[in-house]
Amino acid sequence: MSELSLMGDSISKICVVGLGYIGLPTASLLASNGYFVHGVDINEHAVNEINQGKIHIDEPDLDSYVRSAVSKGTLKASLKPEAADVFILCVPTPFHNDTDPPRPNVDLVVQAAQSIAPFVQPGNIVILESTSPVGTTHLVAETLAAAGVDTSTLSIAYCPERVLPGKIMTELVQNDRIVGGATPEATERIKSFYETFINGTVLGTDCKTAEMAKLVENSYRDVNIAFANELSMLCDEAGIDVWKLIELANRHPRVKILQPGSGVGGHCIAVDPWFIVHQNPPLARMIRTAREVNDSKQVWVANQISQRAKEFEATNGRVPVIACLGLAFKPDIGDLRESPSLEIVESLLHDGHSVLAVEPNIESHPRIPLSSLNQALTSADIVVILVKHKQFRNIELSGKPVLDYCGLNVS
């Protein structure tokens, strides 16, 4: 069992609260480095799966990490926290839709802090990794203090993840990390902790700057994607091939336009910008506009498909079968969180269209019957490409009309 000597004490046991897309990979990575990790989640099914060496989420290589750690006894899961040297909070932070702009929901962060309060001891480390609005790390400290914890003895910091779904286990180790401490001493201490299992550079700052850095990273990407998505809609109206246009424009030495898609999904880019907008709506004008453009793209795509279906019905006297290729929010994974493609397909089904949905990276969906790629292509009158999965890159369409919203450029 590894022990890290930091400022006069040793770290051997870690409690990770939240065993989802960030918490479980983090817990299994720490366990693979010899720490004993006690993972906590309110999902009893997830806890049981993990304790059997299985995983309840879709992420390459994660299963081997979890299986190995559980078999070695360095990782166990539970519904309740235990005493530890380090507590890491990795719970979801969605937003409420009852206001304009949407307001961040940090209820689960507060609940996680309350849950560990009875087990926190003087000198412990408490780390928030959940994507959060500015000020949430201080809220964690205030929550612990309200529960009777002497926070003056603790090292508290915010350390956001920067990983890409589908490559989480690699990027957890290789990517640079930011540690924003509530105090300079906490920053240095927790930097040393991350340096025991991170190969990338660990950068220190204060917690508010670290919180804002995470939001800014995803907002920057959202703004750039919004430019491409808006461009695609303008080009469609003008009868211009947006993919060729972007290829030509990117030959300029200082231009790098991204590729448009059917919207923006995932639990980061589609959510985090709203945290900044909510904090200061009058000043966050461009960030808000980008979010609205990207949200509108999936509505525009659904309307385009519906219009093509109506034209087919008017010409052929029957409702067309529409093959929709891809439900995930990005290529070559089965992650459906905040997926615009999923919402497009659900919208089409709700409006009564005959849809064959294809998603090769999942086995089933609770609301949408899935078709095989061959079945969908054989039966379809219209083929809609929503996600650039590798399985779709060499398909034969036999002259069927194609609506390509991700630049697959199939023949």
Image: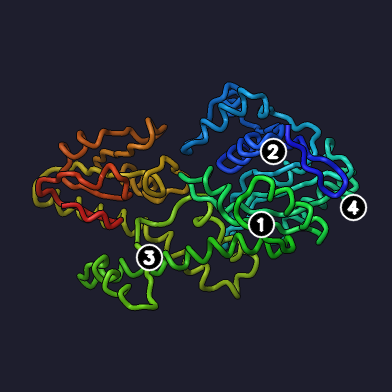
Mark 2 or mark 4, earlier in chain? 2
Residue under the image location 62 percent in, 41 percent down? 26
Mark 3 or mark 2, earlier in chain? 2
Q: Nearer the viewer, residue 48 or 256?
A: 256
Residue beneath disc 4? 152
Tell me: residue 229, above or below residue 254: above
Callout 3 crowding tier (Cα within 10 Å): few <14, some 14–19, many ≥20: some
Residue beneath disc 2? 16
What quarter of the picture does the N terminus occupy?
A: top right
Where is residue 31? Give x, y as percent.
65, 34
Measured Cα–Cα span from mark 2 to mark 4: 22 Å
Mark 4 or mark 1, earlier in chain? 4
Q: Is residue 35 left or right of residue 266?
A: right
- Labelled pair 2, 4 in contact (Cβ < 8 Å): no
Measured Cα–Cα span from mark 1 to mark 3: 29 Å
Q: Which mark is residue 258?
A: 3
As helix, strand or loop, the secondary structure at mark 1 comes to strand
Where is residue 331? Give x, y as percent.
37, 48
Callout 2 crowding tier (Cα within 10 Å): few <14, some 14–19, many ≥20: many
As helix, strand or loop, the secondary structure at mark 3 comes to loop
Residue under the image location 15 percent in, 44 percent down? 396
Tell me: residue 26, above or below residue 36: below
- Labelled pair 1, 3 in contact (Cβ < 8 Å): no
Residue under the image location 59 percent in, 66 percent down? 277
Residue under the image location 83 percent in, 44 percent down? 124
Measured Cα–Cα span from mark 2 to mark 1: 20 Å
Tell me: residue 347, above or below residue 241: above
Where is residue 48? Give x, y as percent.
60, 23
Mark 2 or mark 1, earlier in chain? 2
As helix, strand or loop, the secondary structure at mark 2 comes to strand
Tell me: residue 235, above or below residue 11: below
